[in-house]
Image (cartoon, helix red, strand yellow):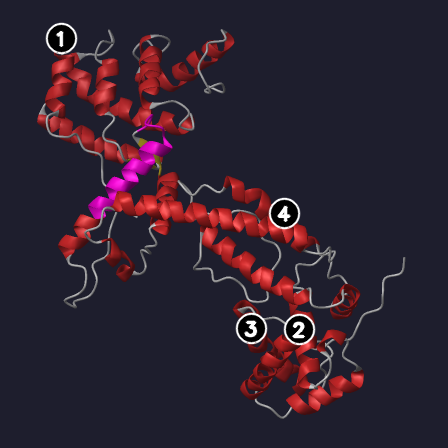
Amino acid sequence: MMIPAIGTNSDDLTQAQSDALGEALLALFRAQARAYTLGDSDSLPLGTANELMASLLYTLDVHPAQPESFRPLIGRDLQALYRGALRRLEEKQRRALALAQSLCLSTPDYGCIALRDTLHSIQSALPGYDARFFAHRIPGEIDYQLAEPVPESLLGVDYILEYLLRLRAELRFLSCFYLPRVLALLSGAQAEWRELVSNLYLPVAANALGLSLLGENPRRLHVRREERRTLLALLAPLHPLDAQNQMERACPGLLAALDLREPRDAQALRALCRDLAPRAACAAASGDLSGVFPSFGMPERA
Amino acid sequence: MLFPAPRLPDGALEAINRRTASFGLALTPAQAAALQRREQHALAQTGRVAFGGSALPRLAEAFSDSPFIQRDAWSENLGELTQLFYALKNETADALSDDELAARMAQAFNGPAQGDLTAMTDAFFMQADDREASDDDSGDWDEF
């Protein structure tokens, strides 16, 4: 395995350090491979070998594309480092599983197939998460898209944990509203929302924010036609960045009105503003905000 | 990601030659070096990585007592057997341990293949079929 030598600064990894670290990592890899094959084989398919190495590097939190990430390993007992890192991954696995189980139990039935299937998939897959040999693999099938996606730089249980934490914040926001109003708004936003992988938080948070901008009760969720005209007049003259600033200034009031105090609640709402402002600006330019701040849809007939 | 080539550790060639001496078989250092290059080539061809050392000592031990091995073809035979070894590791989906695979290769070579390396693969799987038909207790290698 090649450990890249870093630059020319005096604090950088020298070739000798790089070679020593490479040997130490290979020794750790050999031990992993031996454990994986139960000592029965001295060779592996290349694909499997690469997976085992990727798992090892992820567990040790080093990234081949970032040479500086190897520096904390210099002169350290890699076996001991690895054992500690493995215990931390297993602890994250337990946290993620508890969170997934909690969300499965507490999430109302919005009727969204993607959300339901994703939660159940994660809950089912987490007990089988292989932190020892394939730690970098993401357990579960994720169909339901978050309003603010998890960075793809995250892997394995870190990805799932971050996904669940962001999902929990979104679902906590949704739980502030009367369920029939949420369902009515979703139907107004997109008729086939139950079958699609569309995010539920976005239209609900957008309307709540829009009503907050107008000084109206955000829990109403329904934006009337005349209120959309007022929003159009408010947002159309603004540069998207100014619109974003205006929306972000409304966030603390909205969060207080909904009694949401967690940092992730504010983070999700700020991310919404970054997403919403350019869409609103573009829609405002065409004179129609009905796709950004929708009204309630017609209820489904029995 | 580059994995280093397998190599015979110091003293391994002498150990191999000691074990095969009673059968009149020996490898020169040049032959051993050529075999290691051939092994690296076999690994690359079969898309495998060696992490625990060379397969040569194991194969030398398994085949040195074969009545079909000729002294002057020992090095060449080992080279072909190494290629076959890694190919069979893939074809059996790593279901057999290295020791078990080498042993069964030797059984096939000395049995149905009658010393013909070109017939080894067929002989190996024919032997497996016979084993399955006779309900041999082979652990989880049921398919082979």
* Front one among B124 and A265: A265
What secondary structure is marked by label 2? loop
Q: Whole-percent x and y of residue A262?
A: 55, 68
Eye-nearest disc, 1 or 4: 4
* Residue A258 circle label: 2
Note whether A150 is above or below A42 in the view shown. Answer: below
List the residue tagged with mark 4: A120
* Front one among B105 and A132: A132
Q: What residue type is labelled 1?
A: Ser
Alpha-carbon span between mark 1 and mark 4: 64 Å
Q: Mark 4 lies on which chain?
A: A
Q: Which amino acid does label 2 sit on?
A: Leu
Eye-nearest disc, 1 or 2: 2
What secondary structure is marked by label 3? helix
Q: Are the residues tagged 3 and 2 within 8 Å (C-beta)?
A: no
Mark toward the start of the polypeptide (3 vs 4): 4
- Identity of the residue drawn at 78% across and 70% down: A188
Q: Whole-percent x and y of residue A294?
A: 74, 75
Note whether A158 is above or below B47 in the view shown. Answer: below
Eye-nearest disc, 3 or 4: 3
Left or right: B74, with A136 as reference point? left
Alpha-carbon span between mark 3 and mark 1: 80 Å
* Residue A266 circle label: 3
Q: What stretch is highlighted in magenta?
A: A22-41
Q: Residues within 10 Å of mark 4 (few under 14, many from 20)?
A: some
Mark toward the start of the polypeptide (2 vs 4): 4
